[in-house]
């Protein structure tokens, strides 16, 4: 498998779905690795409110008020 095909298989799920079982076996693992989160980890992350606006507080974010000054 050519390098360009390997990268395309990593990035494009539609392309990857058309590969044969033999091609998938020869496909090296993605360099970023596999990340698996448990359900409780996902719940704790989704429950937190994060914002990058410097003037936004958790209170204004949660209450959907304008965080940034005009």
Image: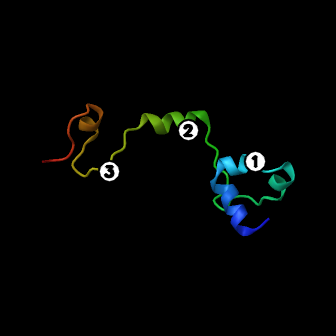
Instruction: Give x and y (percent) for residue 31.
Output: 67, 62
Instruction: Give x and y (percent) for residue 9.
Output: 70, 56
In the displayed structure, 53 sits above or below 45; it is: below
Q: In which quarter of the image is the N terminus?
A: bottom right
Q: Distance between the residues labelled 2 and 3?
A: 22 Å
* In this view, the mark in front (2 or 3): 3
> Is residue 63 rendered to the left or right of residue 33?
left
Q: How crowded is mark 3: few (under 14 residues within 10 Å), some or many (20 or more)?
A: few
Asked whether the residues under the numbered discs 2 and 3 touch, taking CB atoms below 8 Å apart as contact, a structural biologist would say no
Q: Earlier in the sequence, mark 3 or mark 1?
A: 1
* In this view, the mark in front (1 or 2): 1
> Is residue 62 rendered to the left or right of residue 24?
left
The answer to which of 29 and 44 lies nearer the viewer is 29
* In this view, the mark in front (3 or 1): 1
Q: Distance between the residues labelled 3 and 1?
A: 40 Å
Report the residue marked by disc 2.
41
> Is residue 55 rendered to the left or right of residue 50?
left
Q: Distance between the residues labelled 1 and 2?
A: 33 Å
**Secondary structure under the numbered disc 2 in the rendered image:** helix
Q: Residues within 10 Å of mark 2 (few under 14, many from 20)?
A: few
Q: Residues within 10 Å of mark 1 (few under 14, many from 20)?
A: few
Q: Earlier in the sequence, mark 1 or mark 2?
A: 1
Asked whether the residues under the numbered discs 3 and 1 touch, taking CB atoms below 8 Å apart as contact, a structural biologist would say no
Question: Which residue shows up at 21% across the image and 43% down it?
Answer: 67
Report the residue marked by disc 3.
52
Say which quarter of the image contains residue 63. Answer: top left
Q: Which mark is residue 1?
A: none
Question: Which residue shows up at 44% across the image and 34% down it?
Answer: 47
Q: Which mark is residue 18?
A: 1
Instruction: Give x and y (percent) for residue 55.
Output: 21, 49
């Amino acid at each position: 498998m050519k390098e360009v095909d390997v990268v395309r298989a990593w990035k494009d799920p539609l392309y990857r779905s058309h590969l044969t079982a033999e091609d998938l076996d020869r496909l090296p693992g993605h360099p970023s690795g596999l990340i698996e989160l448990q359900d409780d980890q996902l719940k704790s992350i989704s429950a937190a409110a994060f914002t990058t606006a410097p003037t936004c507080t958790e209170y204004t974010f949660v209450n959907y008020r304008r965080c940034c000054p005009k």
